[in-house]
Image: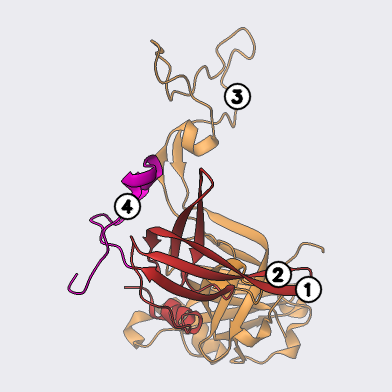
Amino acid sequence: MKNKFIEAIESEIKTKEIPSFRVGDTVVVNFKIIEGNKERIQAYKGLVIAMHRNGASSTFTVRKLVGDVGVERIFPVYSPRIDSITVERAGKVRRAKLYYMRKLRGKATRIRERRKGF
Amino acid sequence: MVKALIGRKIGMTQIFTSEGNVIPVTVVQAGPCLVTQKKTTEKDGYNALQLGFDKILKSNHINKPMGGHFKKHGVDAYKTLKEFRVENADEYQLGQEIRVNVFAEGDIVDVQGVSIGKGFQGVIKRHGFAGGPAAHGSDFHRAPGSIGMREWPGETLKGKRMPGRMGGKTVSVQKLEVVKVFEDKNLLLIKGAIPGHDNSIVYIKETTKKK
């Protein structure tokens, strides 16, 4: 358990509603991008391959393929730059970290869908 | 008001700026401190305040010499005492409380504490020596090498960097920014890392470095 003073500070940050998602899910992260003085929202869709749970410092890693190149982005869960997160598809996986996905291409990267009860 | 406090390091966390950037911060429970002694030019040759932190609750935890000191100045007993220089000590009263609100967001401070003890360490960890190759028949791995037995210098020079006790020393870190002040909880958020392990005593004061 964390120190009560640190928890008090982190509870001020952790006010945002975060939809529940797990490693193996396909999510869309709507990320605010500031260009000059304009602000727009960019959607980033991909597979959650890792979650780092550490209170207000928690992050998650989203992997997608752009053309043939794998792109991974690490988002802080409680970042004010994240507008919203939507879960597109729930995946059933047996690992906490899906780093093996980096070696796989095409058909091998399929993940079974998680249905009720799992 | 004197910009100095005694505090206890709580630990580290992160906070976000409004732009969404992450700032690593150390949480310090700072103060409230009490003025336990005033030092003046007439009496002591210089101006300073002695601050006390963390009240001693049981009277049998105070030894006789310290008890006498507190009694002389008519203040309660405190576990940690530290002197801080001030311009004029007469502006303050004995027993005056110094709270965390002497600092404000954006202040630049110096933090002093005792670094984490690392025990007896070799030259690679202690002084950043490069060491030798790990393999290919190398016999020279983490040893310090020659310490001076060539024609010159022919002796081991004083101050030669060698293995030994590392850490556990008083360290000051200068020019750290105060990110946030929680007056009700007596907490300070200081940007970056500060010396010492969690729950260790640290001294915070306004920076002596020029801008």
**Marks 2 and 3: same chain?**
no
Determine whether B115 is above or below B46 in the image.
Answer: above
Disc nearest the viewer among 3 and 1: 1
Determine whether B191 is above or below A10 in the image.
Answer: above
The N terminus of chain B lies in which quarter of the figure?
bottom right
Mark 2: secondary structure:
strand
The chain assigned the colour red in the figure is: A
The tint of chain B in the picture is: orange
Residue with the most extreme right position: B211
Residue in the foreground of this view, choosing between A59 and B161: A59
Label 2 Cα neighbours within 10 Å, binned few <14 / some 14-19 / many ≥20: few
Residue A110's label in the rendered image is 4
Counting from the top left corner in percent of width and height, residue B152 is at 64, 11
Q: CA distance from mark 1 to mark 4?
A: 41 Å
Asked whether, in this view, residue B188 is left or right of residue B87, the answer is left
Residue in the foreground of this view, choosing between B71 and A46: A46
Which residue is label 1 attached to? A37
Which residue is label 2 attached to? A34
First along the sequence among labels 1 and 4:
1
Mark 3: secondary structure:
loop
> Which amino acid, by three-letter code, is at mark 1?
Asn
The C terminus of chain B lies in which quarter of the figure?
bottom right
Q: CA distance from mark 4 to mark 2?
A: 34 Å
**Marks 3 and 1: same chain?**
no
Mark 1: secondary structure:
loop
Circles 1 and 4: CB atoms closer than 8 Å: no
Asked whether, in this view, residue B80 is left or right of residue B51, the answer is left
Circles 1 and 2: CB atoms closer than 8 Å: yes
Tell me which segment is drawn in magenta: A90-118
Disc nearest the viewer among 4 and 2: 4
> Which amino acid, by three-letter code, is at mark 3?
Leu
